[in-house]
Amino acid sequence: MSPKIPVTANGYISVLDLIIPMLEALEALGGSATNEEIDDVTSGIMELDEATRSALHQGGPLTKFAYRSAWTRSWLKKAGLLENSARGVWSLTPAGKTWGTIDAKKLVDDVRAANRAKAKATVANDETIEDGPSADDWRQKLLVQLIAMEPAAFERLCQRLLREFGFIKVEVTGKSGDGGIDGTGVLRVNLLSFHVLFQCKRYSGSVGAGAVRDFRGAMVGRTDKGLIITTGAFTADARREATRDGAPAIDLVDGDTLCDLLKDRRLGVTVEMVEQVTVDEAAFAGF
């Protein structure tokens, strides 16, 4: 197992610190995992406390750990050690499975050198090469917009999103003192219907287990299905509490997942597909 990584007083963790623990985490997860799973297991390997996990990057909405973790995945992908699917699942490549022999410092130096070389090759096209996870910049911009919304407007957005994903009779209650319940809806799945209570909160930090317990308490006697949507993140304890044995399960949608759902339904997000045309020189040889 990787040694515990020392964290500076301001909670700074570098990409170099994360490389080996993250590769080890992916191996422990069977070679593939979501961002959430990777972050949970990596932080466990590094023995990071909750305060370090929850510290915000430049005031939010992302935590410092989540930001650096996304950055690290980007670098590992550039190095050919990770690949990701359209569904956001990351997996070890054959080279990544040999992580025990990898020199993290050399990997960082090699990726930096490749970035510089690419920057020189594309400077004529005014392309900007960044070391960070630029592919995720749209999520950060979207989260900033979501957090800036009025509470009622954010609730209406969540109402629209649930309808887009098949919920019917979606109502925003807007009641105070209702145990954190912001609305209700019915999800129809084939012949079955499920009454769902939901909570939607704009949040820049991490939602803890206490919030999940409080929400479940408000659900008692009303429904067995609950959903919490937030612009922030959920702590590992919160996710364990949401699926605790013997208690009604509560589904959790964090900021990253919320961004993906909005993108999927094109709600406040525009996706442009760039056409790429390639000339097949060999095809002309046959004329």
Image (tube, rainbow, N blue to C red):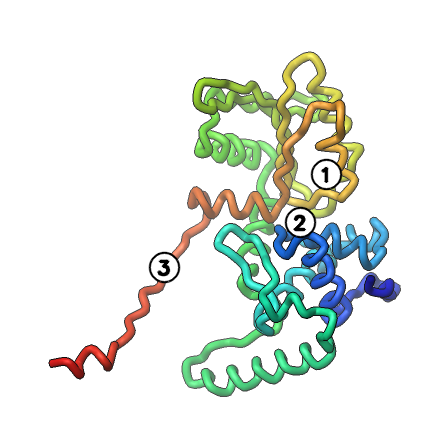
Q: CA distance from mark 1 to mark 3?
A: 35 Å
Query: Is residue 18 left or right of 189 when viewed as pictured?
Result: right
From this view, report whether residue 39 is shown above or below residue 216. Answer: below
| Residue 141 quadrant | bottom right
- Residue on which the image places disc 3: 273
In the picture, the quarter occupied by the C terminus is bottom left
Give amino acid for label 3: Met
Decide: few, some or many residues near mark 1? Use Cα within 10 Å; few <14, some 14-19, many ≥20. some
Q: Pointer 2 and pointer 3: residues touching (CB < 8 Å)?
A: no
Q: Residue furthest left?
A: 287
Per the rendering, the mark at residue 36 is: 2
Q: Pointer 1 and pointer 2: residues touching (CB < 8 Å)?
A: yes
Q: Can residue 77 be seen in this snapshot?
A: yes
Residue in the picture at 68% in, 42% down: 203
Does dot 3 land on a helix, a strand or a loop? loop
* Percent x, y of residue 234: 71, 42
- Residue on which the image places disc 1: 239
